[in-house]
Image: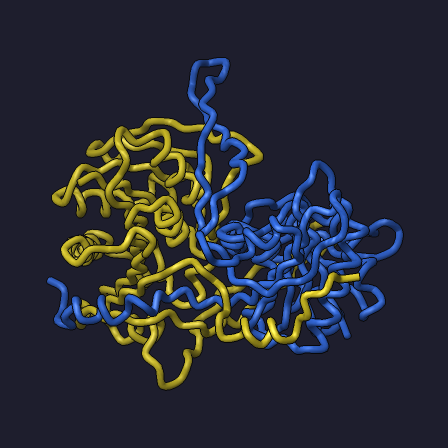
Chain colours: A blue, B yellow
Amino acid sequence: MRILVTNDDGILAPGISALARALAPLGEIEVVAPESGQSGAAHAITFLAPLICERISIDGAFFGWSVDGSPADCVKLGVHELCEKRPDLVVSGINAGANRGVDVIYSGTVAGAVEAAFIGIPSLAISLEASGGFDFERAGVHAREVVARALEIGIDPGTVLNVNIPRLDRGDPRGVKVVRQSTAPWTDTYDRRADPRGRAYFWLTDQGERGDEPAVETDLSAVRAGYVTITPLQHDLTEYRQLDRFERAWPRRPTP
Amino acid sequence: MRILVTNDDGILAPGISALARALAPLGEIEVVAPESGQSGAAHAITFLAPLICERISIDGAFFGWSVDGSPADCVKLGVHELCEKRPDLVVSGINAGANRGVDVIYSGTVAGAVEAAFIGIPSLAISLEASGGFDFERAGVHAREVVARALEIGIDPGTVLNVNIPRLDRGDPRGVKVVRQSTAPWTDTYDRRADPRGRAYFWLTDQGERGDEPAVETDLSAVRAGYVTITPLQHDLTEYRQLDRFERAWPRRPTP
């Protein structure tokens, strides 16, 4: 079992070395990860510039490839060029911060796993809810348990398992729940400032907690309640419930 | 009707001024777009750095805000800070190149529209298939027709219409088709080169054409056949067909 490990916090982030160590008993680890932090990189890819790679030591325990690109770049390049053999599994994380609800759209961690699914390799994204600090060692134990169970069950090559581990400063998780993704939006606000020349610039502020969809259990509510959550993801964004309506509305004649 | 126009090719790209001109008869246009090209930016957002904005003239016909961020940043910042009033509609494009199939995951153009959906504003993403050059003026006519019809029909605030216009160098489109998104993957290859110091670097190569899912009409096949395509998108990535299977497989006991 060959496991490609990536992340979006950068190859020197503590979450990725904790993940590599935690997964080492399950297979042969290869690390290919961004040179620098890529939080919020989403599914960005690099095709108008080249990707420069460097082989580096991680914690003295693993060698890995540092790539000056996004998590999706790392998975593409890792699978097609850098890994000695095609990986059997891609695991992305452990992200410093949960990736729940619409975060899956913004998340570089999740994008690394989704890219693996595009290529036809089963994958998981692992994220740890913030609680002041991050206990990545303990999170690694939970990550390994989930990955091992997922391998027993089998993950379809087109499916990603998005895994969130709840904050660990209040004790162990209450269990594991398989839940759907919330679609509740963030409420964004910006802090408007003036530079020394008087020009306006803007910081996206800390968005605090979101509301959730009422009366449905989602990744948002279940992580908040202290559960490890697992959400299988797919990448067909078609809104099937509206296909018929628009189809009827649009005659097939040529546009003018 | 206030229309926020954005794109991912940058505020000075010809596609966005063609779109702004084409939509001007439908409402009041406000342009908020990236300072530089953001192709492949996907749904990246900026929260660890500030966003610097500049008011600039576009083609001498419109004023717009140039933002040193991604398309999603532009929509967030446009709606919350830069636009005089909340837009009624967001239109992203016209992208130089189609955004079909899994391109919707990589595309900054589509991400700008999806961000609008998160905020609760109806939106469309408009892309033009490459054919050596791009006839954005003619594409603008087709874009306006689609936007006008969409407004008549009504777009749910959480829905994005992803619109692709076929290459126009072979004549007018054969009509309009409402189709689902293809999930056919790209086949990536990299061109490996050595820098003057002997270090390896990699270029993602031109990926050529993809295969498509057989026997189903998708955005991929319909654009290729010469149709304007419209695909309603949503942003719940849950793989519902596998929820039950994983739920049964995962006991709710605590992980060790």
x%, y% of residue A156? Answer: 59, 77
Residue at image location 44% in from the left, 74% down from the top: B210
B200 horizontally vs B31: left or right: right
Is B34 located above or below residue B182 in the figure?
Answer: above
Residue at image location 31% in from the left, 63% down from the top: B232
x%, y% of residue B138? Answer: 18, 56
Name the residue furthest right.
A60
The answer, for residue A74, to whether it is visible in the render is yes
Is B60 located above or below residue A57 in the figure?
Answer: above
Q: Of A225 and B240, which appears nearest the observer? A: A225
B9 horizontally vs A75: left or right: left
Q: Quadrant of the C terminus of chain A?
A: bottom left
Q: Quadrant of the N terminus of chain A?
A: bottom right
Residue at image location 34% in from the left, 39% down from the top: B11
Quarter occupied by residue B104: bottom left
x%, y% of residue A180? Answer: 52, 62
Name the residue furthest front.
A215
x%, y% of residue A158? Answer: 55, 73
B33 horizontally vs A189: left or right: left
Quarter occupied by residue B102: bottom left
Q: Of B152 and B213, which appears nearest the observer? A: B152
Quarter occupied by residue B34: top left
Is B86 located above or below residue A62 in the figure?
Answer: above
The answer, for residue A72, to whether it is visible in the render is no
Is A196 located above or below residue A212 in the figure?
Answer: above
Q: How many marks?
A: 0
